[in-house]
Amino acid sequence: MTTIRTRFAPSPTGFLHVGGIRTALFAYLVARQAGGQFILRLEDTDKSREVAGSAEHLVESLNTLGLSYDEGPDIGGDYGPYRQSDRLDTYHRWAQKLIDAGRAYADPYAPAEVQEFREAAAAAKKPFLYRNHRPENPPVWDGSTPLRFKADPQQYQWHDVVMGDLKTGPEVIDDFILIKTDGYPTYNFAHIVDDAEMKITHVIRGQEFLSSMPNYLNLYEALGLELPIFATMPHIMNEQGNKKLGKRDGAKDVLDYIRDGYLPEALVSFIATLGWNDGTTKEVFTHDELVETFDLHRVGRSGARFDEKRLLWVNGHFIRELPLDELMRRAEPFWPSNAHTVDVAYKQQVLSIAQERLKTLNDLPALTSYFFDEPTRDDTLITENKQLKKLTESEVTTLINAAHDALATLDDWQPGTIQDALNQLLESTGRKPGILFSLIRIYTTWAPFSPQLNDTLALLGKDKTLQRLRS
Ligand code: GLU
């Protein structure tokens, strides 16, 4: 039986965004599920597009999300090197095979000549094809000109696990560059050589490569290579579903999401369900559930929508699922600055009542800072609240006084007894919770939201609660 080997092959040209992570995740899942290997290969053959630091950033992103690879540039493996710029000899060796077989030639044309060919084709209303201009007696290739593949145009039919059965005619096939004048191979050439040498069984990649498939199939044939399984991932669309996800719609660096208080496991679950489901309505998956149930055949052909509100919901779900001590560990960098002045047990209590309401760890300061600091009065919480803004000043004073006096009589300052007192207060004042409880919450916290009122007051303590109501 062949071992399943998948790869993630990013170019170090910037940060890793959601689309890239999805490709990596699906390749990872296919390998893990089959007990195979997941390989990281750095495709750094376009020196002009390289961004300093992005290779390290890619590695950090994969590690942060727990997408561990079995072979890669920083850890090695049996089929290395895993950085294309370290594999130039390999590409030249394979290129020589094509030259020897008469399937590659030195491209003799200067850009101006190619431009003339293009214009002539346009004037004749014909598509421009390099293969219509093959030199009769090409010079021996010495690296000073590009090395171009001599295609053998034909019809192709192939199967893509996601896109289904596909078919193209010979007209879409053309001669393309294998090796550039800087000595580096093109992606089109290098990835096929590498996938073969690294014994990759599944090529899982983005939709932008689909139109080049006929050319790739032609090259596989010329190189005498067996075809891997192909699975093409559709684009991820913006929330409206009308265009490809761009930076403005949230195609941001995955590490930014982590910095913004998202949990890696929430991102993984959310990204897995961009275009994939398990056949039920289940929306959140743990790592192990994904490994067990993921199936490339269930990836949709049309673009999945990136809905940031759903991500927020998924993140809240994973936060609520965390055991408290684990949440404590994860929340550490997110506390409001004064939280370090209190003891750990108190922080843990704050977290235990806030947990239910946290959508991201970044909500922690807004949700809890009044436990550690005297809050600053913010009247907009009242003037911008639909119900509260209708109250007169004396109505507010009366209600707050009533709350103060009722709570002041409590000897036992516990969530249960506080709740009883609050309920009695509802009856005696004849107000709705939306008014009475909101007012008490605002006057004791001056925060836009907080954990449940009785829990909040219990933890704030009787003295602080009464003192804030008084002031
Ligand atoms: N280097 C290509 C990219 O970053 C990888 C495509 C592939 O997976 O084959 O888009």
Image: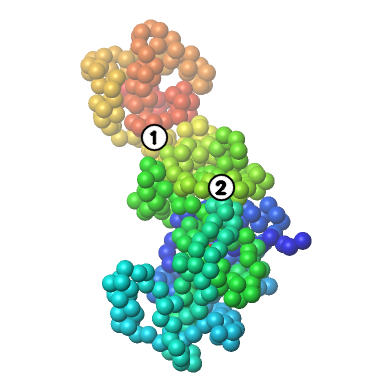
Q: Are marks 2 and 1 in contact (CB under 8 Å)?
A: no
Q: Looking at the picture, which amino acid does disc 2 mark?
A: Val
Q: Looking at the picture, which amino acid does disc 1 mark?
A: Tyr
**Quick one: label 1, few (<14), some, or many (20+) residues within 10 Å?**
many
- For disc 2, the marked residue is 299
Q: Looking at the rendering, in which quadrant would you find the N terminus?
A: bottom right
- For disc 1, the marked residue is 370
Residue 100 x/y as whole percent? 58, 87
**Residue lying at 46% horizontally and 66% vertically, measured from the top left:** 172
Residue 108 x/y as whole percent? 40, 87
Q: Is mark 1 within 8 Å of ligand 1?
A: no
Q: Tell me how far mark 2 sits from mark 1, CA to CA.
A: 46 Å
Kindly give the residue lying farthest to the right in the view shown.
Answer: 1
Position of 351 with respect to 377 (left or right) is right
Q: Which SS class for mark 1?
A: helix
| First in sequence: mark 2 vs mark 1 | 2
* Residue closest to the eye, 369 or 250: 250
**Residue lying at 35% horizontally and 69% vertically, measured from the top left:** 126
* Residue closest to the eye, 463 or 87: 87
**Residue lying at 48% horizontally and 17% vertically, measured from the top left:** 419
Q: Which SS class for mark 2?
A: loop
Looking at the rendering, which quadrant does residue 132 occupy? bottom left
**Quick one: label 2, few (<14), some, or many (20+) residues within 10 Å?**
many
- The image shows residue 445, relative to residue 287, as above or below, that is above
- The image shows residue 66, relative to residue 382, as above or below, that is below
